[in-house]
Image (cartoon, helix red, strand yellow):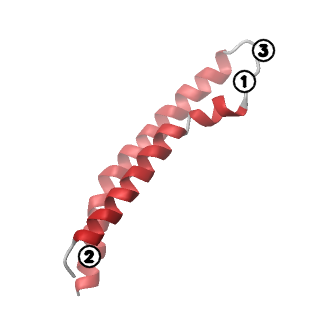
Amino acid sequence: MALRTSVTDAVRNAVPFLVITVLWIVVMLVVYGAFLTTKPAAITYDPWVHASVFAVPGVGFLGHVLQQAIAGRERPQ
């Protein structure tokens, strides 16, 4: 029963973060799409420019995973 409660708590804690992350990724993809469709045809960008679009959500996701790992380790068994 303790495992079930632990899993339920972890999912309940993760859902708001996952919703925010999905919304952020959708917004970033819309902005990225606008960026690609409005840039002049003669201009090309390095791969790091394209990868930077996904860096902010990635850092946020990793931060949340780290926070959950720390919180899980601090909980009494």
How far apart marks 3 and 1 lie (CA) works out to 11 Å
What type is the residue that disc 3 sits on?
Ala
- For marks 3 and 2 on the same chain, the one whose residue lies earlier in the sequence: 2
x and y, in percent, of residue 69 in the image? 35, 65
The residue singled out by tag 3 in the image is 41
Task: Please tell me which residue lies in front, 50 or 18.
Answer: 50
Mark 2 surroundings: few (<14), some (14-19) or many (≥20) residues within 10 A: some
Query: Nearer the viewer's eye, disc 3 or disc 2?
Result: 2
- Left or right: residue 67 versus residue 43 is left
Dividing the image into 4 quarters, which one contains the N terminus? bottom left
Q: Which mark is residue 6?
A: 2
Q: Which mark is residue 33?
A: none
Query: Nearer the viewer's eye, disc 2 or disc 1?
Result: 1
x and y, in percent, of residue 20 in the image? 36, 44
- For marks 2 and 1 on the same chain, the one whose residue lies earlier in the sequence: 2
Q: Image height check: is 11 above or below 16?
A: below
The residue singled out by tag 1 in the image is 45
x and y, in percent, of residue 72 in the image? 29, 69
